Structure formats: structure tokens, C-alpha cells
Amino acid sequence: MKMHNQKTPVSKKILEINPNHPMIVNLSENLTKIDHKKASNLILDQANILDGNILSNPSAYLENLTEIFIK
């Protein structure tokens, strides 16, 4: 549609999480050891990276990632 100079409909983005993914399984098994907000932000940031978006705060992403790995 963009090639024909027509507006593309705006679609609402949906985050789908695979509950069987090893990262999600590992996070769910260690919920008492991790900060839930940081873990959820990490998952959302990873989804944005995969979608080709630029992170609004890349340093916070790296801090969260480092903290998850250390624990």
C-alpha cells in the first residue's frame, strides 16, 4: 500500500510470549530471585529489538540483562 501512496492501517502491536521458551521457563522457575519489573522490561526490550525498533533506553536494557545474568 505504501508503494501506491495509500495509508496503511494502524495495527495494535501484541506481545506474544512462548511459555515453553527456555528463557521464559528459567525466569518462571526463579521468580523469587529476580525483579519482576526488570524481567518484564527485558522481555519487552528484546521483542522491540527483534521487531527492528530502537530502544528508548539501551543502557537500562543492558543493566537489566546484566543483573539477570548475575543472579
Image: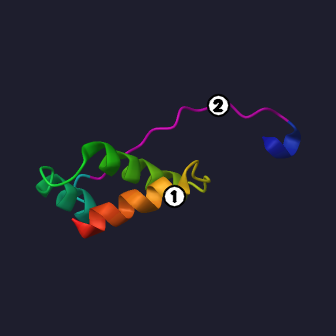
* Callout 1 crowding tier (Cα within 10 Å): few <14, some 14–19, many ≥20: few
Whether 41 is drawn above or below 69: the answer is above
Q: Which residues are magenta?
A: 6-18
Label located before the other in sequence (2 or 1)? 2
Please give left or right for residue 56 compared with residue 39 in the image: right
Q: Within the image, what quadrant is residue 51 found in?
A: bottom right
The residue depicted at 46 percent of the width and 56 percent of the height is 61
The residue depicted at 54 percent of the width and 57 percent of the height is 58
Q: Where is residue 24 shown, x and y percent of the image?
A: 24, 56
Please give left or right for residue 5 compared with residue 34 in the image: right
Residue at the outermost right position: 5
**Secondary element at tag 2:** loop
The residue depicted at 23 percent of the width and 65 percent of the height is 22
**Along the line of sight, the residue nearer the viewer: 16 or 58:** 58
**Along the line of sight, the residue nearer the viewer: 24 or 2:** 24
**Secondary element at tag 1:** helix
Q: Where is residue 29 shown, x and y percent of the image?
A: 12, 56
The residue carrying mark 2 is: 10
Q: Mostly what secondary structure, the magenta segment? A: loop
The residue carrying mark 1 is: 59
The residue depicted at 60 percent of the width and 56 percent of the height is 52
Whole-number angstrom distance, CA of label 2 to CA of label 1: 30 Å
Q: Evaluate whether residue 67 shows in this view.
A: yes
